[in-house]
């Protein structure tokens, strides 16, 4: 008691009362939710050392202890934020794609002119290419993921400012780290998970896939 802001502690108590679950369960989940919301935007500086706000929360409870119910209640704000962001990104995506098509049409036209021997097109071509690069991606930002391969986890982090919350009520993350998606089932596949937790730089290079 008193370890959380009063309103957040009251929310956790309300979830515990409503779902008839141990008081510590929703409060522990809320720590992970706060971590997901703050990760990448805030950090803690202790002297000359900087720590990110990543947390690893494991709820050890028997089947039927309503872990999933508490998780849904506590993580609902994250999912609502994602849905709103998805709607906003959809409108932006249509505008971005329209602009991309116009620029690509202009780029194709300049290439045809260059193929015909017309000179002095370099500056305009460079300008078009620069605008295409600056358009970037219009995909909706993500806060949460679940069943995901280690490589895709690295990609998702790169696409979302270097952080993502991995939430799984059935412990699937441990199966993945244990080699669920690896050809060698005896090989530990949790290196990326450990690096993300500690905030270490990640470099992934795979044949036929863009580097991360």
Image (spheres, rainbow, N blue to C red):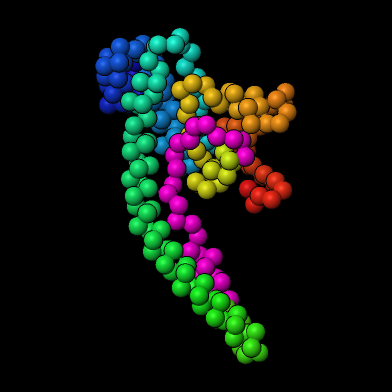
What residue is rendered at 30% in x and 11% in y?
Answer: 20
Residue 171 horizontal/vertical position (percent) = 52, 21
Residue 55 horizontal/vertical position (percent) = 50, 28
Residue 51: tell me if it is visible: no
User: In which quadrant of the rendered image does the N terminus lie?
Assistant: top left
**In the rendered view, would you say 23 is above or below 10?**
above
- Which region of the structure is painted magenta? 126-151
What residue is rendered at 47% in x and 69% in y?
Answer: 101
What residue is rendered at 37% in x and 54% in y?
Answer: 90
Residue 76: tell me if it is visible: yes
Quadrant of the rendered structure where residue 76 is?
Answer: top left
- For the residue pair 39 and 152, the one nearer the viewer reads as 152
Q: In this view, does 107 lie to the left or right of 179?
A: left
Q: Is residue 100 left or right of residue 87?
A: right
What residue is rendered at 52% in x and 72% in y?
Answer: 104
Residue 109 horizontal/vertical position (percent) = 54, 81
Total numbered badges shown on the rendered structure: 0
**In the rendered view, would you say 74 is above or below 80?**
above
Residue 64 horizontal/vertical position (percent) = 40, 11
- For the residue pair 33 and 112, the one nearer the viewer reads as 112
Instruction: Check residue 175 for magenta coloring.
Output: no
Q: Residue furthest top?
A: 62
Quadrant of the rendered structure where residue 78 is?
Answer: top left
Q: Is residue 63 left or right of residue 2?
A: right
**In the rendered view, would you say 14 is above or below 128?**
above
Instruction: Check residue 137 for magenta coloring.
Output: yes
Q: In this view, does 120 lie to the left or right of 17?
A: right
Q: Which residue lies furthest to the bottom in this view?
A: 118
């Amino acid at each position: 008691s008193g370890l959380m802001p009063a309103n957040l502690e009251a929310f956790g108590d309300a979830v515990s009362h409503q779902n008839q679950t141990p008081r510590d369960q929703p409060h522990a989940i809320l720590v992970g939710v706060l971590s997901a919301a703050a990760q990448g935007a805030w950090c803690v500086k202790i002297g000359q050392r900087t720590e990110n706000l990543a947390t690893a929360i494991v709820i050890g409870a028997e089947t039927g202890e309503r872990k999933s119910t508490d998780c849904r209640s506590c993580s609902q704000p994250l999912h609502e934020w994602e849905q709103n962001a998805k709607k906003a990104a959809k409108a932006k995506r249509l505008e971005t794609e329209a602009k991309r098509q116009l620029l690509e049409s202009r780029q194709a036209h300049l290439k045809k002119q260059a193929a015909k021997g017309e000179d002095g097109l370099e500056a305009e071509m460079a300008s078009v290419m620069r605008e295409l690069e600056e358009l970037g991606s219009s995909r909706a930002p993500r806060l949460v993921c679940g069943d995901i391969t280690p490589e895709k986890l690295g990609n998702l982090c790169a696409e979302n400012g270097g952080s993502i919350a991995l939430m799984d009520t059935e412990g699937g993350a441990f199966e993945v780290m244990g080699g669920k998606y690896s050809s060698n089932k005896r090989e530990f596949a949790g290196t990326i998970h450990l690096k993300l937790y500690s905030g270490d730089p990640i470099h992934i290079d795979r044949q036929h896939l863009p580097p991360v």
